[in-house]
Each structure stands twice: as structure tokens, then as C-alpha cells.
Image (tube, helix red, strand yellow):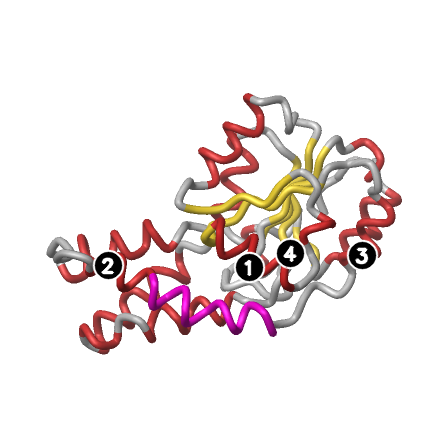
Amino acid sequence: MKTLRNISTYQSIIFDCDGVILNSNHIKTQAFFNVTKEFGIDYATNLQEYHILNGGISRYEKFDYFFREILKRKPVKNEMDQILNNFSLNVKSQLLDCEVEQSLLKFRKISPDAPWIVVSGGDQDELREVFDKRKLSKNFNGGIFGSPRNKYEIMDDLISSGKVSNKSLFIGDSEYDAKVASNFKLDFAFLNQWTDVHNWKSKYKDCSFANIDELIESLCVIE
């Protein structure tokens, strides 16, 4: 596995949400199908497949792709707002009930001084509401950020403002997460227990961990 720094040397730790903090990838995957099946099963299936291949990218970009490349038309008045609202309604209640990474508190105890930050493709307002209701927000003292801004925009702002340096660890579960971490020269850990990436064993074997527990073992002994 890739050599990571000791946990004490990281100035901040950045988390993706779906597939990292919450076991929610399957919820989003089904929701993309559910809210577009009225347009046709084949179209909905195409969007669902696009979503799986582009984990970490926001729903805003994916529904834009749905109209532009799959339906090959522009949304009519209020159509995009309606589909986004339907998607949020479809997933929010399930996000309030799905499994949470069980070792988050254990991880927080060994990194008490480093700000924890969420950088997600999920809707920012929705994320903050779910994290508040699930009493997770207090752990992420560096902020909870999501779409409609993409992860590159969020990270650029965090670095420009001095909230994040390249002595940071990005924890994700998608190819997009890996690219973002590489772009900003951050250490990257790929969690595979809930990922939608089918070929993660070949792509991320040097930085892959089953879960937070396995990551903790590495971060506590490797420098």
C-alpha cells in the first residue's frame, strides 16, 4: 500500500460523504433511476450507468447530462427544478437511516487537532441537514461542503483561504475523488467497502483500504 504520513502530521482531513461516511451509494444509484423512469426505462438506465461511472460528480451535472446527452433536448420550464426536488425527496429520508461508518468516532479521537472537512458531490443544504439530524456535524469542524459547486471549486476555495494545505489527507471512494486529490497534491486514501468502482483492485491497490479501521492501522504506524 502507498506510504501515508503518520496521522499526527496531517493539518486537515477531507472526507467524501457517499460511500465513505454513509453507506449511501446504492441509495443515490436507485434514486437516479426512480426519478427518470417516467422518461423511459432505457433513458433512466443510461443515466444510472452514467452515475455509477462518474461517482462523486454532483446531481446537477448528471441531470444536465441526462437532458443534453441522453434525452438530447433542453428541459422545459421548471422541469429541472422538479427533477432535482424529486431526487432530494427520494434520497433524504434514506440518508437519515442508512449505515454510518462505525469507526468515525475512533478516528476522531486519534486526530483531535486536525480540522475535519466534508467535500461531497451531494447537495450542500441536504448534507448539512442530514448531518445535523444524525448528530454528525460536530465532528466536521472544518465545514461541510457540497454541490452545486463541484469538488475542484470547493477545494480551490479551501486552499485559497488557507483552510487546507497540501499536508492534508483526502478520503474518497471514486475515481473523481482520486483525481481531485492528485490535482491539489493531497495524500489520498481509497475506501473500498461501499464503493461503486468495479475495478478498484487494479486501479487503487496502492492506496486502498477496506474501511476506516484499516486506514487507522496504517496511519498510526506508517510515516
Where residue 171 sits in the image (x, y, percent)? Answer: 64, 47
Can you tell which of label 2 and label 3 is closer to the viewer? 3
Q: Amino acid at mark 4?
A: Leu
**Residue at label 3?**
105
How many other residues sit within 10 Å of disc 2, few (<14), some (14-19) or many (≥20)? Answer: many
Contact, mark 1 vs mark 2 (Cβ under 8 Å):
no
Nearer the observer, disc 4 or disc 2?
A: 2
Disc 1 element: loop
Q: Which residue is mark 4?
A: 191
Circle nearer the N terminus (1, 3): 1
User: Which of 176 and 133 lies nearest the eye of the viewer?
Assistant: 133
Q: Secondary structure at mark 4?
A: strand
Taking 161 as reference, is 144 above or below it?
Answer: below
Query: Magenta residues, as a range?
Result: 85-97
- Which is nearer the N-term, disc 2 or disc 3? 2
Q: Which residue is mark 2?
A: 66
Residue pointed to by mark 1: 18
Camera-side residue: 116 or 169?
116
Residue 50: image quadrant is: bottom left
